[in-house]
Amino acid sequence: MAKTINNNSADSAQLVESLTEIIRTIESVGVEKTRLYLKQARLSSHDESEISNFIIALVCKKAKIPQSKLFAGDNRSENRSTALSFIFCLHKIHLGYGTKDMSSVFEVDQANISKYMKRLQYFETSTIRKDIEILKMYNAINEQVEEFSKTKSI
């Protein structure tokens, strides 16, 4: 299942740089540890992707928003804003993503990610019944994500 590499000079340069780094790692820690690190990185990336997809699907289902509309930006509804708040906070908690990581993954400005994450903090201090219900929904989703994460090896 090897990936085909184009004869693009940028691809070639990245490949050479990657192989050089692998050789340095082998020289530093040995072949077996290098192989183990590479395998862990590959599996971790796969598990992170599964957890991320689970978070997005679950939040969209609970917020009753189609995934296609989540990052579209044309819908300024409260449900969409709340869903984005949940998604960004859950990615921070369960995957350790910072705003910079989320910005590159979701192609959303870091300032907007921070804004959505602060929105959840508002719910935590609110005494308004509707906000308390939103926080209960977040906690229920968080518990489901925790259960799902336990089945993965992150």
Image (tube, grey):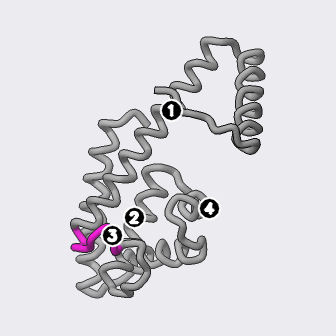
Queried whether the magenta region covers residue 23, the answer comes back as: no
Q: Which residue is mark 3?
A: 68
Residue type of the residue flagged with mark 4: Lys
Q: CA distance from mark 3 to mark 4?
A: 23 Å
**Of marks 3 and 4, which one's residue comes earlier in the chain?**
3
Residue 69 location, x and y as percent? Answer: 34, 75
Q: CA distance from mark 1 to mark 4?
A: 21 Å
Count neighbours of disc 3 (C-alpha within 10 A) and say few if under 14, some if 14 to 19, many if 20 or more.
Answer: few
| Callout 3 secondary element | helix
Q: Which tag is nearer the camera, tag 3 or tag 4?
A: 3
Residue 44 location, x and y as percent? Answer: 47, 36
Q: CA distance from mark 1 to mark 3?
A: 28 Å
Q: CA distance from mark 3 to mark 2?
A: 14 Å
Q: Which tag is nearer the camera, tag 3 or tag 2?
A: 3
Which portion, as a residue range, is magenta?
62-69
Q: Is residue 128 left or right of residue 12?
A: left
Going 29% across and 87% down the picture, which residue do you hit? 128
Q: CA distance from mark 2 to mark 4?
A: 15 Å
Q: Main secondary structure of the magenta part?
A: helix
Q: CA distance from mark 2 to mark 1?
A: 23 Å
Q: How many marks?
A: 4
Q: Which residue is mark 2?
A: 87
Q: Which residue is mark 4?
A: 100
Q: Which residue is mark 1?
A: 42
Q: Quadrant of residue 137?
A: bottom left
Q: Which tag is nearer the camera, tag 1 or tag 3?
A: 3
Count neighbours of disc 1 (C-alpha within 10 A) and say few if under 14, some if 14 to 19, many if 20 or more.
Answer: few
Residue 151 location, x and y as percent? Answer: 30, 36
Q: Is residue 22 left or right of residue 71?
A: right
